[in-house]
Amino acid sequence: MKTFLIEIGTEEIPARYISKGLGALKEKFEEFFSKSYIEYGKITGYATPRRLALLIEDIAEKQQDREVEIIGPPKKVRTVRLKWEMLKALLRAENHEEDKKNRRRRTL
């Protein structure tokens, strides 16, 4: 486990906004670590009119291992649909190239 310090230098922050800004910064880091599956310990905030800082203790060096099961359509449906989507994309690309050629011919 490591300790992480982030310090953000700012222009002069009015005193009434410092606690709100520090609270929002702390909340965003907690949200980020939770969504990223990174374990962390205590988060302590420090602030001055020109700096916001967070000291995060006991931060994990890597994300937690997890298993994700993805359930999709049956393979037969999936392959037919993918083939159709690829065919449409190729036709669009071919038409686009043809349009470019026609435009060049018209402008010459």
Image (tube, rainbow, N blue to C red):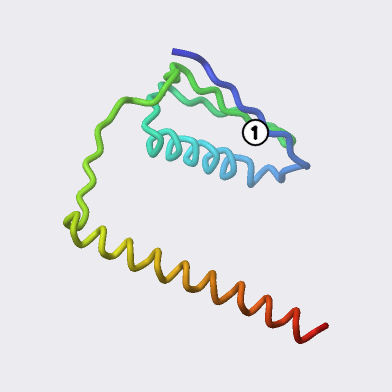
Nearest the eye: 36 or 55: 36
Horizontal side of 45 relative to 102 (left or right) equals left
The quadrant of the picture occupied by the C terminus is bottom right
Residue 90 appears at what percent x and percent y?
A: 47, 67
Residue positioned most to the bottom: 106
Query: Residue at the spot x=32%, y=61% of the render?
Result: 82
Residue 44 appears left or right of 10? left
Residue 48 lies, in percent from the top left, at 69, 32
At 19% from the left and 54% from the top, the residue drawn is: 75
Going 54% across and 72% down the picture, which residue do you hit?
A: 94
Task: Identify residue for label 1.
Answer: 52
Q: Residues within 10 Å of mark 1 (few under 14, many from 20)?
A: many
Q: In terms of image quadrants, where is residue 8? A: top right
Q: Is residue 69 left or right of residue 11?
A: left
Number of marks: 1
Name of the residue lying farthest toward the right: 108
Q: Quadrant of the N terminus?
A: top left
Q: Is residue 6 above or below residue 76?
A: above
Badge 1 marks a residue whose secondary structure is strand
From the viewer's perspective, tell me whether residue 60 is left or right of residue 48.
Answer: left
Q: Nearer the viewer, residue 28 or 98?
A: 98
Going 61% across and 77% down the picture, which residue do you hit? 98
Please, what is the three-letter code of the amino acid marked with disc 1? Leu
Residue 105, picture quadrant: bottom right
Q: Position of residue 79 (x, y in %)?
A: 26, 58
Q: Viewer-proximal residue, 95 or 78?
A: 95
| 102 shown above or below 81 | below
